[in-house]
Image: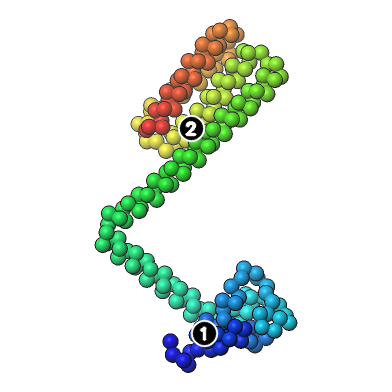
Amino acid sequence: MSNKNLINCEFCFTKVEDLDTITLPCGYVVCSVHLESDDAVTKCVVCSEHTFDKSACYKMAKNSSKQKELNFRKKITLVNEKIDQIGTYFEDPDKFLDEYLNIIENEVTDRAQELKNDFNQQISDYKEIKEKIEENNFDKAKIIRINICFRLEIIRKCIRRKVNQAGNKEKEFIDPVLDLINKNLTNSIDKRITLDALVQISSSLIKQMTTIFTVIITV
């Protein structure tokens, strides 16, 4: 850096490169770092007698060319950093693969946790609805029917999400089972069956749902 490129900041009196200075609307020249706050409108740091819009200040003829040059330098620096990074990948490809796979693994873990939280929330909602139903003295047969419908809906959402991502082979396996569960559920609700029979059907359907949910998780 040659002396001819240095200029005195009229606020902190530090010698800095001209490219790193900003000319204020009032004419004073200061280090650009003095304007790095997030405020769109700021008070003049030198004379303190006026405020100004920083965006308009940067667009002034004396400043705009400097901003373009600084932005260009930042892009060059970023490109050089990427080139250096690529160079390290060539030197140590195993490290690159480990870092990349760690990123993928973290994304998968985060997504799994998100799905788990969603599922737990649905279970919590189900329990809350069940408690409200019981508080309102619904008979047990109605509660069991609602339990079946609600649990099936929770599992169906999870299964359907998986089906949309699965191949034809998995769809051919899952869809018939869903149809069977729907058929059994419809028959159990449409018929006037005893409470004991309804409890038995509920238990059977829940086991089927659990089995299918376990299978699709491992597909």
> Which corner quadrant holds the N terminus?
bottom left
Task: Find numbered disc 1 in the image and state the secondary structure of the residue it sits on.
Answer: strand
Residue 44 visible to an observer of this rendering: yes
Observer-nearest of 121 and 198: 121
Q: Are marks 1 and 2 in contact (CB under 8 Å)?
A: no
> What is the x, y in percent for residue 129?
64, 26
Q: Residue at x 52, y 33 (%)?
A: 119
In the image, farthest residue toward the left:
91
- Mark seen at residue 156: none
Which tag is nearer the camera, tag 1 or tag 2? 1
Kind of residue indicated by mark 2: Cys
Residue 61 visible to an observer of this rendering: no
Is residue 133 shown above or below 11? above
> What is the x, y in percent for residue 190?
58, 13
- Looking at the image, residue 183 sits to the left or right of residue 30; the answer is left
**Mark sitting earlier along the chain (1/2):** 1
Q: Which residue is mark 1?
A: 16
- Looking at the image, residue 99 sits to the left or right of residue 58; the answer is left
- Mark seen at residue 158: 2
Is residue 68 shown above or below 3? above
Task: Find numbered disc 2 in the image and state the secondary structure of the residue it sits on.
Answer: helix
Observer-nearest of 10 and 85: 10
Q: Residue at x 55, y 11 (%)?
A: 198
> Which corner quadrant holds the C terminus?
top left
In the image, farthest residue toward the bottom:
4
For marks 1 and 2, give the CA distance. 61 Å
Q: Local crowd at mark 1 within 10 Å, few (<14), some, or many (≥20)?
A: some
Q: Quadrant of residue 64?
A: bottom right
- Looking at the image, residue 159 sits to the left or right of residue 61; the answer is left
